[in-house]
Image (tube, rainbow, N blue to C red):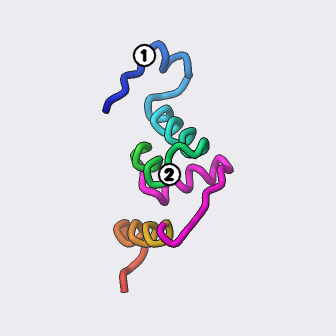
Amino acid sequence: MSVVIPDEILQATRMSEAELKQEIPVMLFQKEKLSLGKASSLAGMNRVLFRHLLASRQIPTSYDVEDLQSDVKTLQEMGYLRSQ
């Protein structure tokens, strides 16, 4: 599905297209409409970066074993952590 936002609406928000693409998933996550994984995917970010974005806005997240496993995998893929 694609959502088209008219330029006048984008201008009214005084946000760039990139900012709006982040704002929508943040809002949906905050309202508990999307999981962390789905929200980060919608934002075009991996979970680690999306979690940093949420932390910068002081938006709390829950953290379970599945999140930890996903974060470890992401860090390995990014080269920050070696697999054993």
Residue drawn where x is 47% and y is 69% of the image = 66
69 or 31, nearer to the observer: 31
State which quarter of the image contains the C terminus. Answer: bottom left
Q: Position of residue 29 (x, y in %)?
A: 55, 45
Q: Is residue 52 above or below residue 68?
A: above
The reply to whether the C-beta atoms of the residues labelled 2 and 1 are less than 8 Å apart is: no
At mark 2, the secondary structure is loop
User: Hey, which residue is sitting farthest top in the picture?
Assistant: 8
- Which circle's residue, 2 or 1, is located before the other in the chain? 1
Query: Which mark, by number, is residue 15?
Result: none
Q: Callout 1 environment at 10 Å: few (<14), some (14 to 19), or many (20+)?
A: few
Circle 2 residue: 35
- On screen, 78 above or below 22? below
- Left or right, 14 with reference to 41: right
Instruction: Nearest to the eye among marks 2 and 1: give it.
Output: 2
Q: Outermost residue, left direction?
A: 1
Give how far across and how far down residue 53 sits, in percent. 56, 50
Residue 46 magenta:
yes
Secondary-structure class at tag 1: helix
Amino acid type, callout 1: Asp
Q: Residue at x 62, y 54 (%)?
A: 55
Circle 1 residue: 7
Q: Measured from the top left, where is residue 69 in percent x and y?
A: 45, 72
Q: Residue at x 37, y 22 (%)?
A: 4
Q: CA distance from mark 2 to mark 1?
A: 29 Å
Magenta residues? 45-66
Q: 16 or 55: nearer the eye? A: 55
14 lies above or below 37: above
Q: Position of residue 80 (x, y in %)?
A: 42, 72
